[in-house]
Image: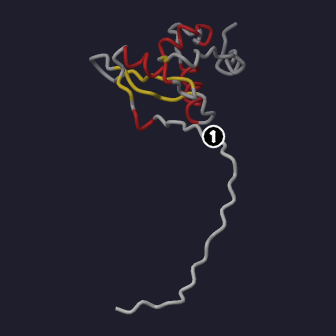
Amino acid sequence: MSIRKTQRKNKTKQVITWPSNDDYFTVKSLVALNPHMLTSAPKPSDITLRVRLNKAINEENLVAVIGHKNCGKGRPELVFAMKPVKQTAIDKAKTNNIMIDTPRLVTVMDISSQPKVNITPVTVTAKQVVSA
């Protein structure tokens, strides 16, 4: 019995194993972590994993694009990190000669709660007019 397009097993319920927040990753390293996500065609494809990665970047905000790796020929390979992006992941990427896209990264500020101070405004009345 041949498996038609409508009868094949979907990969909708597969779970992706994401890397830790302290490290960066590429599509190749994500495929190495999730070999079960490859299609079982004569030529295995990682399209399901790429679609899930795109959804995690654009819709779910789980992953951030932190830079790219220039491999010499062709398109540069994108480099990702889990959100919130930690400084350790950026430092590891910089040590491995990865070009960091700084406009894409958003720095997070720590806001401490300070005690409330009641300030009463002082009103100044103009009683004397100074003439020149």
- Quadrant of the rendered structure where residue 2 is? top right
Name the quadrant of the C terminus: bottom left
Which of the two residues, 83 or 120, is positioned nearer the viewer here? 120
What residue sits 67% from the left and 18% below the top? Answer: 11
Residue 25, image x and y in percent? Answer: 49, 17
Q: Is residue 40 above or below residue 22?
A: above
Amino acid beneath label 1: Ser
What residue sits 53% from the left and 27% below the top? Answer: 85
Which of the two residues, 119 or 68, is positioned nearer the viewer here? 119
- Quadrant of the rendered structure where residue 55 is? top right
Residue 121, image x and y in percent? Answer: 63, 70
Callout 1 environment at 10 Å: few (<14), some (14 to 19), or many (20+)? few
Q: Is residue 107 above or below residue 97?
A: below
Look at the numbered disc 1 and give the secondary structure of its residue. Answer: loop
How many numbered circles are shown? 1
* Residue furthest to the left: 72
Q: Is residue 95 left or right of residue 56?
A: left
Name the quadrant of the N terminus: top right
Residue 13, image x and y in percent? Answer: 72, 19
Which of the two residues, 22 or 124, is positioned nearer the viewer here? 124
Q: How is the image coloured?
A: secondary structure
Q: Which residue is mark 1?
A: 112
Which of the two residues, 110 or 131, is positioned nearer the viewer here? 131
Residue 120, image x and y in percent? Answer: 66, 67
Q: Is residue 43 above or below residue 129?
A: above
